[in-house]
Image: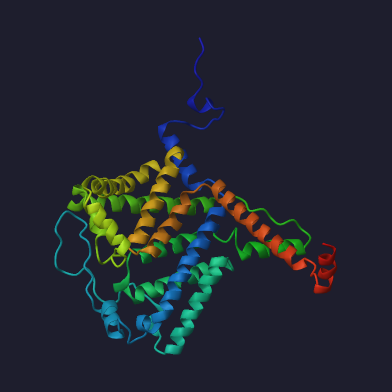
């Protein structure tokens, strides 16, 4: 009578197997396997461009934003930092008390808390912009990533009353790109590495998959799912999402929607005059938003459904950017969503751009090297014709 081998020997190994072991191995593969760092390079470039754009816009009202006598002056910031009571969230089922959990110095910091001279404020702002530009193109990426994050936090903490979702997602991306090897590809750092290897007569070292790349991408993916799940579940607390009127309340809101566009207003009027079409777009859009945000964290992990979920996310954030005017928030969310795009797709995108730029370069080189035909050379040709 034959006896079955121990469970660990079924696959030719002596390692124990079982449900808990399978879960542990899956957990280890999910977080600590090796991944191609190219997606992180793409995310760094797009994120850096949006960060640079946001802070270039800050230049228009820089002193009003961060100077001691700005919109939120020094006395107000000192009160928020040192005197404003902090009420903690209760850690039990009680309703809490009116007694503040902490008073005194808060754990917030900004370089602009310590600058009074407008010249130094402008110089610091230019320094942050320089660091953000260098981070975008990938120069000393580890250092410039940290400097970019310090700059981002300096503006967020200096103007906490202006902070909204864009600042939160921008901060999240900066932190994860600090952890990630975001300068391993598509960066000046990589070009210098190749140049230095050629100068030594060596072959450029290949870009190898790394655990840190996979870990950073997983952090972005999981955080994106948490954002969607929290957003979707919190919407269930609002009656407008149950009645199907939430999208209409956004599209017809003068604070967000482009109501100064006659075409847009006529479109809303047209929908209001056709009840069935209104229900399909407004009620359907409301429930589709709920379905997307709540199901995304569970369905995006299935390869067959990943592109469907990503396309839904792109459409939703495009609508948010165009209709609600939250363009930079939507762009940062799309940068975070790039973590779900497979590395093969990133390679195809980069190769396509590379071929396009090569073709453009060859066109201009051929045009530059084309012989110049003088008027004297043209005359015999015209006479012969």
Residue 373, how many percent across, how many down?
80, 69
Residue plotted at (47% across, 53% down): 338
Residue 161 lies, in percent from the top left, at 29, 73
Relative to 140, 152 lies left or right: left
- Between residue 245 and residue 193, name the one nearer to us: 245
| Rendered residue at 27%/77% (across/down) | 80
Using the image as rendered, state which of residue 84 and residue 306 is in the foreground: 306
Judge whether residue 52 can be spotted in this image: yes
Q: How many marks?
A: 0
Q: Nearer the viewer, residue 171 or 305?
A: 305
Q: 174 or 247, which is in the foreground? A: 247
**Which residue sits at x=35%, y=64%?**
326
Provide residue 336's location: percent of width, then percent of height: 44, 56
Is residue 210 visible in this depiction of the protein? Answer: no
The C terminus is located in which quarter? bottom right
> Quarter of the image holding residue 134?
bottom right
Q: Is residue 219 left or right of residue 209?
A: left
**209 with respect to 290 (left or right):** right
In percent of the image, x 46 and y 68: which residue is there? 51
């Amino acid at each position: 009578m034959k006896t079955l081998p121990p469970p660990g020997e079924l696959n030719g190994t002596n390692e124990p197997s079982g449900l808990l072991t399978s879960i542990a191995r899956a957990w280890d593969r999910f977080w600590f396997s090796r991944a191609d760092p190219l997606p992180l390079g793409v995310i760094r470039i797009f994120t850096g461009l949006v960060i640079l754009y946001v802070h270039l816009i800050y230049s228009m009202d820089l002193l009003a934003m961060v100077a001691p006598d700005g919109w939120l002056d020094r006395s107000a910031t000192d009160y928020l930092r040192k005197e404003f009571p902090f009420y903690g969230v209760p850690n039990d089922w009680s309703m809490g008390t009116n007694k503040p959990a902490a008073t005194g110095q808060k754990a917030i910091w900004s370089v602009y808390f310590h600058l009074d001279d407008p010249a130094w404020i402008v110089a610091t702002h230019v320094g942050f912009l320089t660091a953000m530009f260098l981070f975008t193109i990938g120069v000393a990426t580890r250092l410039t990533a940290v400097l970019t994050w310090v700059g981002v936090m300096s503006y967020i903490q200096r103007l906490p009353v202006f902070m909204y979702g864009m600042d939160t997602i921008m901060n999240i991306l900066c932190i994860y790109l600090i952890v990630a090897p975001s300068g391993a590809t598509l960066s000046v750092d990589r070009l210098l590495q190749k140049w230095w290897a050629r100068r030594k007569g060596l072959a450029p070292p290949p870009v190898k998959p790394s655990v840190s790349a996979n870990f950073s991408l997983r952090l972005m993916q999981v955080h994106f799912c948490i954002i969607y799940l929290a957003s979707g579940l919190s919407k269930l607390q609002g009656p407008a999402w149950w009645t199907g009127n939430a999208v209409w309340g956004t599209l017809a809101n003068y604070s967000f929607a482009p109501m100064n566009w006659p075409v847009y207003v006529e479109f809303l009027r047209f929908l209001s005059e056709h009840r069935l079409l209104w229900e399909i777009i407004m009620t359907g859009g409301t429930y589709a938003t709920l379905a997307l945000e709540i199901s995304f964290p569970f369905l995006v992990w299935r390869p067959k459904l990943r592109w469907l979920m990503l396309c839904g996310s792109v459409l939703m954030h495009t609508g948010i950017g165009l209709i609600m005017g939250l363009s930079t928030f939507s762009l940062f969310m799309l940068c975070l969503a790039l973590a779900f795009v497979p590395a093969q797709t990133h390679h195809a995108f980069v190769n396509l751009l590379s071929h396009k730029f090569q073709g453009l370069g060859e066109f201009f080189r051929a045009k530059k090297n084309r012989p110049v035909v003088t008027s004297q050379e043209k005359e015999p040709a015209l006479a012969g014709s």
